Image: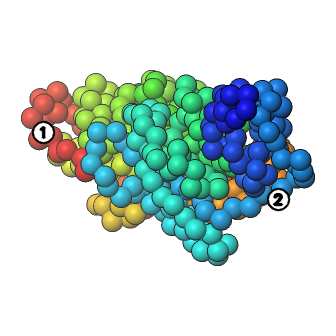
Amino acid sequence: MPNGVRLQDVADLAGVSIGTASQALNNRPNVAPETRVRVIDAAKTLGYPTKPSLEPVTAGIEVVGLLTKHDFGYPPAINAFYSHVQAGVESECRRQHLSLMYSNIEVDSSNRPVSWPAMLTEERIDGLLLAGAFIENVAWHFKRRLDIPIVLIDAYATNLLYDSVLIDNDRGTRSAIEYLMRLGHRRIGLIGTNSASPPSLLERRQSFCSVLEAHGLDPSYVVDSELSQAAGYDSLKHLLEHTPEVTAVFAAADLVAIGALSAARDMGVQVPEQLSIIGFDDIDLAAVVTPALTTIHVHKTWMGTLAVRQLLYRAAEPLQPKVSITLATQLVERASVSVARERDPVTRSQVDTTSRVKGG
């Protein structure tokens, strides 16, 4: 350039990527109006040429990007929950004649991203669906790399305001605990959460405590654990070793509940005759384990469908207020819960001599 100003200089001053700056200055679609104004102002300030006509452009989406969480350090595997979300996204994209790009985003045990896929930096997508991740401290890092419509699916970004499709974790948990109480359970345990859990699990933990406290029951039968089948196995053993009076357990996710079922079987505790176990999510395995798992059904496929529709709406109406869609849940009664009964306490020696089964 005659004055030495580069496009990168404009992008830096506007706080956007060089690709976004180029699209804004060339009146390309899928750039938010406020971002376009910021880029143009930066270009004028620096003396970088801008197009004479800056008529508003019509935002459109042709390629949707879908990122679903993948636990860091584990081999790739089909996610029992988000595979159904992906199915809903794919179905709606076909119906809307949209192309779909898919990638995993690696997250730590709190669902915070540890790396970003190339999809976000190569600017091949017109809109993004982010499923399962918690973008808190990296929010600004994330925002600078992508200035396109974004919808979060069972995901959270505390420092940025995005459209989202979420689960009614509060009412789902309340329905589970109140169901157990109607069957006479008064000493109910919780496994599958900890203080560093992602927001959705912390909501379930908070609701668990709130319901019990509201009914004058003890909410302290809690074992901190991660969200995995192996953790479910270990945490149930720990719970029954230290509080054998517990007659029912709420697992914050079905994978944790399935691990707990294995632990109960190895300990000689009969489910549901001696111990009731209830999960959350209603993954496919919940219906085929023995005994079949009573759980809270989440409309996972519908979450993906709604997310695509909201993404299209956001592209067409970028300045409208952000929207959070919360999906109701449904109690699914199967065979892992029964009326409360007294049972013989589990001794420490019984717990110590049981074999440990690692979760899948």
Query: Residue 256: percent from the left, percent from the top?
Result: 35, 44
What residue do we see at 89% from left, 47% from top? 52
Determine crowd level at label 2: few under 14, some 14-19, many 20+ residues with C-alpha closer than 10 A.
Answer: few
State the image quarter where residue 12 is shown: top right
Between marks 1 and 2 in the image, the one whose residue lies nearer the viewer: 2
Q: Tell me which residue sits at (61%, 62%) in the image.
A: 63
Where residue 315 sits, quadrant-wise, is bottom right
**Residue 47 percent across, percent down from the top left:** 80, 30
Observer-nearest of 133 and 246: 133
Q: 145 or 250, which lies in front?
A: 145
Q: Is residue 322 left or right of residue 61?
A: right
Would you place residue 208 above or below residue 57 in this image?
above
Seen from the viewer's position, the closer of residues 24 and 189 is 24
Q: Which mark is residue 58?
A: 2
User: Total number of numbered labels?
Assistant: 2
Labels 1 & 2 near each other (Cβ < 8 A): no
Q: Is residue 343 visible?
A: no
Q: Is residue 107 visible?
A: yes
Residue plotted at (49% across, 27% down): 219
Query: Circle 2 — which element?
Result: loop
Q: Secondary structure at mark 1?
A: loop
Question: Disc 1 marks which amino acid?
Answer: Thr
Distance of label 1 from label 2 (alpha carbons): 64 Å
User: How busy is the neighbourhood of tag 1: few (under 14 within 10 Å), some, or many (20 plus)?
Assistant: some
| Residue 273 located left or right of residue 61 | left
Type of the residue with mark 2: Thr
Q: Position of residue 97 (x, y in %)?
A: 64, 74
The residue that appears at 58% across and 50% down in the rendered structure is: 123
What colour scheme does the image use? rainbow
User: Mark 1 sits on what residue?
Assistant: 354
Lower position in the chain sequence, tag 1 or tag 2: 2
- Residue 338: x %, y % from top left: 41, 53
